[in-house]
Image (tube, grey):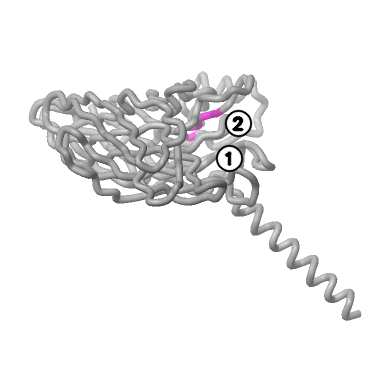
Amino acid sequence: MSSRRGLLIAVIVCTALFLVSAASATYAGDRPLVTAFHETLHGGYLFSTGNGTYSGAIAPGGTYAVAFDMTLPAEATVRYQRFYVYWAWSKLDQNAIYPSISVTRTDTGERLNMTGRYVDSKGFVSTNDFFTGMDIFETADLQPGKNSFTVVLENAAEDNRTFVVQGIGALAVYESPGSPEAHCWVKEGADLLYNSYGITPAMATGRIDFEGTVDRSELSSAELLIVAPSGGYTRENIPEINRLFVNREGETSMPSFFDALLSALFPGSNGKEWANIFDADELRQVGIDRRDVLPYLRSENNFAAVQDEKDYLVLTNAVLWAEVR
């Protein structure tokens, strides 16, 4: 009797360990982006990855530079500004380790202050289970007019750790008296999504919630920016490698014909779905997507979702910019 009880306990323990392991398999969408900035203001925003390309492995003391040209309107005042360093494959020999990164802006000579780091990984023991992430740096405000500058990154490690950089992003949300009023959401994080190793596309989906309410009838335009390092670049011949959903609540129980008919009669009634959204290639590996989402917005509980279908991507940034008439 005791042996049977012991066997039962062992089975329960093993099952629990399996479930914990499965739940922590972070190729799934388990690290939602967080709200970094959310305000209503008269202004606009800029996002650029400059002339950055994939770096290859950066050894200690090695550097990586990106040049930017960003133009603010006259009388603009920056309200929120950040640099984002998109890094991956951070390792010491074959062991996962966080990178040591130093960033300098050449036009001001300032060494930038890191204010945040988001990290993800496979989440289970296997080969090449290294960290991937996004580091966030503060910088002196851009000035009205043209801003041309270079950002230089250095591997500041005192040991032999290496990492790769897929690019650097620069974001500036600004206030400008002559600009329309707009609702702005800035979301940040790092959620590694990969439809593989038992992770289904539904699991490999990162949801982005845009909290609060808007008067849908007063909006004149709405743009959604999504940033995903590795997104859109794959060597596999797959017809559809990723998807974007905006206020799309999932499949309906109706036949596809009726669903299509309702969508035609009532555009945006169940959101919208797009496939193969990111623009990237072997050199420029930061996937970026900008699109008009006004027809699919609603007055509250707006959300977007990015789904991987063998693309392998890191969901890092989202900006929703909705202008008032």
Q: Which residues are magenta?
A: 242-247
Mark 2 = which residue?
Answer: 309
Spot the residue most to the bottom.
2
Q: Nearer the viewer, residue 184 or 105?
A: 105
Q: Is residue 71 left or right of residue 189?
A: left
In the rendered structure, are the residues bearing label 1 and label 2 in contact, judged by CB atoms less than 8 Å apart? yes
Could you tell me how many numbered marks the image carries? 2
Compare marks 1 and 2 and give the one earlier in the sequence.
1
Amino acid at the residue labelled 1: Ala
- Residue 49 in the image: x percent, y percent? 33, 28
Give the quadrant of residue 193: top right
Mark 1 = which residue?
Answer: 204
Q: Is residue 121 visible?
A: no
| Residue 14 - label | none
Q: Is residue 40 left or right of residue 97?
A: left
Is 31 drawn above or below residue 77 in the view shown?
A: below
- Residue 241 in the image: x percent, y percent? 58, 26
- Considering the numbered disc 2 on the image, is that residue within a helix, a strand or a loop? loop
Q: Nearer the viewer, residue 89 or 224?
A: 89
Q: Please report the residue visible at 55 percent of the width from the left and 50 percent of the height from the top.
A: 95
- Residue 270 in the image: x percent, y percent? 51, 31
